[in-house]
Image (cartoon, rainbow, N blue to C red):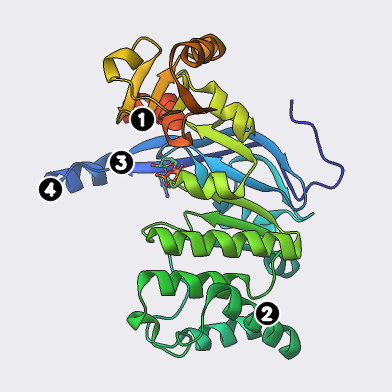
Amino acid sequence: MTKPFADAAVQVRDLSKQYAVHDKEPGFMGSVRAFVKRQTRQVQAVRGVSFDLAPGEVVGFLGPNGAGKTTTLKMLSGLLHPSSGSARVAGFEPRRRERAFLKTITLVMGQKQQLMWDLPALDSFLINQAVYEIPDDEYRATMAEFTEVLGLDGILKKQVRKLSLGERMKCELAAALLHRPKVLFLDEPTIGLDVNMQEAVRAFVRDYNARYGATVMLTSHYMADVTALARRILVIDAGEVVFDGDLNALAERGSSGKTIRLQLRRPATPAELAAYGQVVTSDGLSAELTVPRAEVSERAARLLSALDVADLTVEDPPLETVMAELFGARPASARPAGEVTR
Ligand SMILES: Nc1ncnc2c1ncn2[C@@H]1O[C@H](COP(=O)(O)OP(=O)(O)OP(=O)(O)O)[C@@H](O)[C@H]1O
């Protein structure tokens, strides 16, 4: 049972979405058959999802491909109507798309762009200023701040089509946050960016969250985004929330063991190290071992007494490993249950 926050920024109850999909065989005869008897399939993309986000909270929204993340974010932004259940965002019902609601939220989709391709980004910013009725002084202050944090100098007057992917994404973010929304839905905001640009986007989101106390719901396939920004993780699988909790608790869910990193004063061979755990890397004086979670203390104690250890640290496996363990092994076809052919 989801406990309600008295003043939740996002409140979701039993939210579901079904898409009606019309199937058609390829080719001319397929078209004729579809015309005579249309095959309709219901795809249950989101099924009975409930959660609350507190004001200012940053939440990583994870799950395998097709799990229902984008569908959920679109419902919370009012782009899609839920099939059933309810959602409130900053006190508004998203599906009504009230003006005050649209001024309070933003949805950034890394795969879609809102900037006009043939114009400089600055022109799109001015349009957004008018659309969101941003006063001139606030517009100037926000622009100055975003220019500094995102390093926009020198790119705002270039045609958007001539910007690099990273430069364009920075401008997309600036355009989407110009009206200083209180609730941010970020769907893969760093997709396709190089590591430096990913870090720049993360730093910007972190800064914005701290400065404006904004609530952020973030999906990303780059776990570094999630671990850098969010303490709480929501995991959705086949349309259902299967985990809602602390990042560390998720890491502990992984069936794999913990990682022991070693620095040695006297070298040990991989064969010697294998007595203490599965050797991941070893170059004589440093090594990385995977050990069963329940036996970490005992293995570490044995290592310390048997070898000349300069340093020993114990870490959880990277989130990528945990997610791969939770979802990676299953065939995609086994996931989206509940498809009904009519
Ligand atoms: N417009 C649509 N019509 C029919 N089915 C759809 C539509 N959009 C999404 N789906 C289906 O709904 C399910 C959830 O899709 P959704 O895009 O929400 O997943 P996701 O978690 O965002 O996936 P990804 O990580 O791959 O972007 C999938 O089975 C998808 O094929």
Report crowding for label 1: few under 14, some 14 to 19, many 20 or more residues within 10 A (C-alpha). some
Residue 56, horizontal then vertical, whole percent: 74, 53
Regarding residue 78, the answer to whether it shows in the image is no
Q: Residue at x 75, y 64 (%)?
A: 212
**Mark nearer the N terminus (2 vs 3):** 3
In the structure shown, which secondary structural element does the residue marked by tag 2 occupy?
Answer: helix
Side (left or right) of 300 relative to 230:
left
Query: From mark 1 to mark 4, how far is it between C-alphas?
Result: 64 Å
Depth order, front residue of 60/96: 60
Q: Between tags 1 and 4, which lies in front?
A: 1
- Judge whether 38 appears above or below 300 on screen: below
Q: Between tags 3 and 1, which lies in front?
A: 1
Question: Residue 105's image quarter?
Answer: bottom right
In the structure shown, which secondary structural element does the residue marked by tag 3 occupy?
Answer: loop
Residue 64, horizontal then vertical, whole percent: 42, 36
Depth order, front residue of 185/30: 185
**Mark nearer the N terminus (3 vs 4):** 4
Query: From mark 1 to mark 2, how far is it between C-alphas?
Result: 51 Å
Identify the mark at residue 27; answer none if there is no mark.
4
**Mark nearer the N terminus (4 vs 2):** 4
Ligand 1 falls in quadrant:
top left
**Mark nearer the N terminus (1 vs 2):** 2
Q: Between tags 3 and 4, which lies in front?
A: 4
Which residue matches tag 2?
142
Q: Residue at x 67, y 35 (%)?
A: 50
**Mark nearer the N terminus (3 vs 1):** 3
Side (left or right) of 129 relative to 138:
left
Specify the amino acid type for callout 2: Thr
